[in-house]
Image (spheres, rainbow, N blue to C red):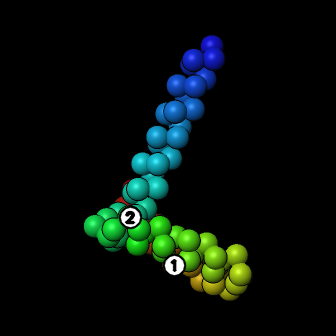
Amino acid sequence: MRQASQTEARRKDAREKIQLGGLIAKAGLRYEKRALLLGLLIDGASRIRADERERARLLTIGEKAFAHDPD
């Protein structure tokens, strides 16, 4: 039972990582260096914690991108 639960946790983790990678590709950043991507994410995380308007602005951009997604 414990092994089955660990296997399920690994599958869930792998699926989440694949989905996050898909977001990078959808944003048009597939071929950027990993260090740049991490820098963007760290900077963005800092911005949305400090500024609720920036958080709302970025959320709107993301929602529009998903709305135009054929999937």
Q: Residue at x 46, y 40 (%)?
A: 14
Residue 58 location in percent, x, y? Answer: 56, 79
Q: Secondary structure at mark 1?
A: helix
Q: Is residue 71 left or right of residue 8?
A: left
In the image, farthest residue toward the top: 1
Of 68 and 23, which appears nearest the observer?
23
Which three-letter amino acid code belongs to the residue tagged 2?
Arg
Q: Where, quadrant-wise, is the C terminus in this rendering?
A: bottom left
Q: Residues within 10 Å of mark 1 (few under 14, many from 20)?
A: few
Rendering quarter of residue 50: bottom right
Looking at the picture, how far across and down is residue 61, in whole percent? 51, 78
Where residue 24 sits, quadrant-wise, is bottom left
- N-terminal label among 2 and 1: 2
Q: Is residue 8 above or below residue 62?
A: above
Q: Is residue 53 above or below residue 63?
A: below
Can residue 69 be seen in this snapshot?
Answer: no
Label 2: how many Cα within 10 Å (few below 14, some 14–19, many 20+): few
Q: Which residue is mark 2?
A: 34
Tag 2 secondary structure: helix
Closer-to-camera residue (55/3) = 3
Q: Up-down: is 52 above or below 5?
A: below
**Position in image of residue 38 (x %, y %):** 47, 67
Q: Residue at x 46, y 56 (%)?
A: 20
Q: Is residue 62 visible?
A: yes
- Which residue type carries mark 1? Ile
Residue for badge 1: 61
Q: Which mark is residue 19?
A: none
Of marks 2 and 1, the one in the foreground: 2
